[in-house]
Image (cartoon, rainbow, N blue to C red):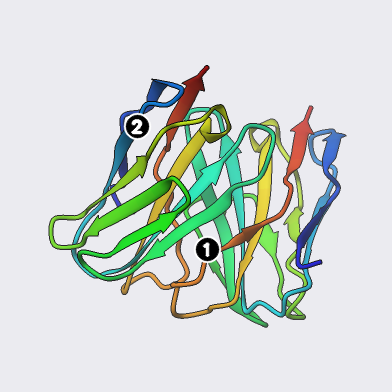
Amino acid sequence: EAQVTQNPRYLITVTGKKLTVTCSQNMNHEYMSWYRQDPGLGLRQIYYSMNVEVTDKGDVPEGYKVSRKEKRNFPLILESPSPNQTSLYFCASSPDSYYSNQPQHFGDGTRLSIL
Amino acid sequence: ILNVEQSPQSLHVQEGDSTNFTCSFPSSNFYALHWYRWETAKSPEALFVMTLNGDEKKKGRISATLNTKEGYSYLYIKGSQPEDSATYLCAPMTTDSWGKFQFGAGTQVVVTP
């Protein structure tokens, strides 16, 4: 089944404890992206990757890191999480890189709580 | 940062009624417009990707039109059903920011039986 898989789905952790949210897609998609969703603020893009080894900042990259060492995986790293990173996170992928006329497929989301 | 506006913010519709709402965006450097449907406790699901001025797309009872010259798109729901209750998001793409997605805040649709 074609899908975007995020792990974990839920995580409660403490300030400063490094964490990684994994994202994997099995559709051989070029493009991958991370979003966070906060009440009243909609979906905001954190980082995106047009292809392997190519990543770029979205609108809210502060406090996050990403890497794209292989096409299928795009982990989101919080080196020193803070409470303002408590949010619902979505990973998405799309076949296209430079021509954004293909829709994105979203993972099921990861709910992070940073205490 | 693009100025993407969706209106209204929310609307309530009686089952069987039709409705429509708007996504407004800057018309310069336009490339494509994405529409997504987001049900509570689920993940966003793609509805349409539109690229041409005057384009119309349809999926079941949901359709969309696009005006790239004036920078807006309408989404229509015909004969609304309770399962149409969701937040509808749009995201315009421009040629000067490949890969960047900036979603509007969405229009929340509640269909009551």
Instruction: Please indicate whether residue B97 sits to the left or right of residue B54 in the image.
Output: right
Mark 1, residue position = A57
Count of numbered tags? 2
Judge by depth and name the residue closer to the eye, B102 or A14: B102
Q: Is mark 2 on a helix, strand or loop?
A: loop
The local crowd at label 1, few if under 14, some if 14 to 19, many if 20 or more residues have their Cα within 10 Å, is some
Q: Residue at point 77% right, 71% down?
A: A73
Q: Is mark 1 on a helix, strand or loop?
A: strand
The tag on residue B18 is 2
Q: Residue at point 37% right, 26% down?
A: B17
- Where is A25 relative to B37, above or below? below
- Where is B96 relative to B33, above or below? below
In the rendered structure, which amino acid carries the disc numbered 1?
Lys
Judge by depth and name the residue closer to the eye, B4 or A78: B4
Circle 1 marks a residue in which chain? A
Image quarter where the N terminus of chain B lies is bottom left
Circle 2 marks a residue in which chain? B
Q: Residue at point 44% right, 59% down?
A: B48
In the rendered structure, which amino acid carries the disc numbered 2?
Ser
